[in-house]
Image (cartoon, helix red, strand yellow):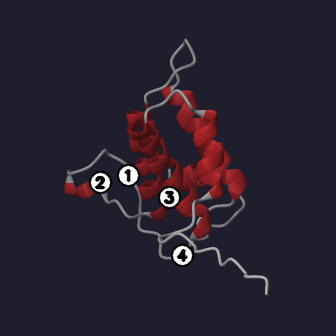
Amino acid sequence: MEQMQIRKSRPGPKPDPTKAMIRAMFTDWSPRTFETYWSGHKLLGDLVRLGYITHEQKVEIAQEIHGRIDRPNGTFSVRRYERECGAAFLKVTGAYDSGHGNGPGVETEAVSTPPSAGSTPLEEQS
């Protein structure tokens, strides 16, 4: 009788294919640097998953962020990218009220429902 081999699955969550693809683009970064970048990237992705923005708007926001933080030689601060993504997340969701004086100075009004898909979310909140 032929014996069947049963392949055991590894414990834990399955690897994220998007994360693996982006990691392959930044092979010279340390794992810690990449995780900082990934943290910011996930914040923008969460806006899409939660229905606040479309994928196209996410790309526009990322381009706006890079336009502000990219250095003349083409590099950028991964830590600043993460902070800018966090500020964009808070601005779009309206989760931050600048009246309390304990944040980056993002002035927004609370948003109870996701904004319309017609314009850039950062423009809507301004």
**Mark 2 in CB contact with mark 1 (< 8 angstroms):** yes
Task: Judge from the rendering whether residue 14 lies leftward or rightward of residue 96; answer left or right.
Answer: right
**Of callouts 4 and 2, the N-terminal one:** 2
Type of the residue with mark 4: Thr
* Residue for badge 2: 98
* Residue for badge 4: 113
**Of callouts 3 and 4, the N-terminal one:** 3
**Of callouts 1 and 3, the N-terminal one:** 3
60 to 12, vertically: above or below: above
Q: Secondary structure at mark 3?
A: helix
Viewer-proximal residue among 78 and 24: 24
- Within 10 angstroms of label 1, few (less than 14), some, or many (20 or more) residues? some
Residue occupying image coordinates x 41% and y 68%: 110
Residue occupying image coordinates x 51% and y 55%: 42
Label 3 and label 2: CA atoms lie apart by: 14 Å
Task: Judge from the rendering whether residue 32 lies leftward or rightward of residue 59; answer left or right.
Answer: left
